Structure formats: structure tokens, C-alpha cells
Image (spheres, rainbow, N blue to C red):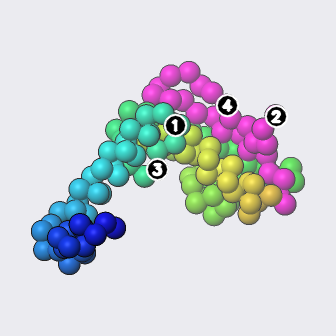
């Protein structure tokens, strides 16, 4: 800090900042800028978790899980992944992939589960996603 700044009293002061700016306004502006950054970022990645990006992709899916040669029931799939064994994903199907991969790489690693996820994006062609990746 220069002698001139000290002499003029023009140093940063939180109290002066708070007097001149409404802290709620500042927080609001920061929140909106953060949201704008996340929406822009969502245009370049497959998953969309923390932003208000438009729901332009909807996927219909069916999940089949096999552990030790046994096919899990709908209830078992829901308990294991906190996700229905079939349904719609209103965001990106990559959100479902990420959820399943995360579970199988951590909590379910010892089970050696085999997953088959059949899905269609926006009513298009049917695709298949398999775990473990081959």
C-alpha cells in the first residue's frame, strides 16, 4: 500500500463496502453469474447436474442387473441404485451412466455386477450401454 493511499484514506474497508453496496444485491449478482457460467459449461459436457440448462434431451431406458447369475428384481435395482429399473431420464442419459458407474466402482465393486442399459434418446434408435466396459 502506498503512502498516498494511506494519507487519503482510500484503502479497502469492508465496512465502507457494505455501506455502499447492498450485500444481498452482491450475492444475487454472484449467484446469477455462477448460474450463467454453469449453463454455458453444460453445453460442452454430457452431464448436467448443477445448472438450469434446458431439458432438450429425454431418454427412455430399461436397466437389467445380473449378480452371480441372478437377475435383480425391480425392487432390488431400486434399493441398489436409488433408480427405477425402467423409466425416463429428463436430463442427459449420461447422468444415469455416471450414477451407475460411480456405484459399481465404489459400493458395488465386490459384487462383480453385469449391467445392461438399453435406452432411446428423444425417441430415436435403441442403444445399449454395458458394465463393466468392454
Which residue is label 4 attached to? 128
User: Label 3 to label 2, Cα distance in Å?
Assistant: 27 Å
Residue 73 in view of the camera? no
Q: From what the image shows, is residue 43 above or below residue 20?
A: above
Residue 55, horizontal then vertical, whole percent: 37, 38
Q: Residue at x 20, y 78 (%)?
A: 15
Q: Circle 3: is it few (<14), some (14-19), or many (20+) Cα within 10 Å?
A: few
Reply above or below: 90 against 108.
above
Image mark for residue 45 = 1
Crowd tier of the residue under label 2, counting other residues whose Cα lies within 10 Å: few below 14, some 14–19, many 20 or above: few
In the depicted structure, whether residue 35 falls above or below residue 116? below
How far apart marks 4 and 3 lie (CA) works out to 23 Å
**Looking at the image, do the residues carrying marks 3 and 2 touch, with CB atoms under 8 Å apart?**
no
Mark 3 or mark 1, whichever is nearer to me: 1
Residue at x 47% of width, y 26% of height: 123
Is 91 left, or right, of 95 in this rendering?
A: left
Task: Locate the N terminus by quadrant.
Answer: bottom left
Expressed as whole percent of the image width and height from the top left, the position of residue 64 reads 69, 44
Residue depth check, mark 4 versus mark 2: number of the one nearer the observer: 2
Query: Position of 34 compared to 21: left or right?
Result: right
- Residue range highlighted in magenta: 110-134
Q: In what element is the residue under mark 2?
A: loop
As drawn, the label of residue 134 is 2
Q: In this view, does 101 lie to the left or right of 58?
A: right
Task: Identify the image quadrant of the C terminus.
Answer: top right
In the rendered structure, which disc, 1 or 4, sits on the residue that comes first in sequence?
1
Find numbered disc 3 in the image and state the secondary structure of the residue it sits on.
loop
Count neighbours of disc 4 (C-alpha within 10 A) and say few if under 14, some if 14 to 19, many if 20 or more. Answer: few
* Among the two numbered marks 1 and 2 on one chain, the one whose residue lies closer to the N terminus: 1
Amino acid at each position: 500500500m502506498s503512502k498516498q493511499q494511506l494519507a487519503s484514506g482510500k484503502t479497502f474497508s469492508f465496512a465502507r463496502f457494505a455501506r455502499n453496496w447492498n450485500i444481498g444485491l452482491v450475492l444475487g449478482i454472484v449467484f446469477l453469474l455462477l448460474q450463467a457460467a454453469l449453463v454455458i459449461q453444460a453445453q460442452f459436457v454430457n452431464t448436467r447436474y448443477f445448472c438450469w440448462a434446458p431439458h432438450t434431451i429425454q431418454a427412455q431406458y430399461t436397466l437389467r442387473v445380473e449378480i452371480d447369475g441372478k437377475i435383480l428384481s425391480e425392487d432390488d435395482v431400486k434399493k441398489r441404485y436409488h433408480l427405477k429399473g425402467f423409466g425416463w431420464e429428463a436430463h442427459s442419459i449420461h447422468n444415469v451412466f455416471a450414477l451407475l458407474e460411480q456405484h459399481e466402482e465404489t459400493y458395488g465393486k465386490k459384487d462383480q455386477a453385469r449391467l445392461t442399459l438399453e435406452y432411446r434418446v428423444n425417441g430415436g434408435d435403441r442403444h445399449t450401454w454395458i458394465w463393466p466396459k468392454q
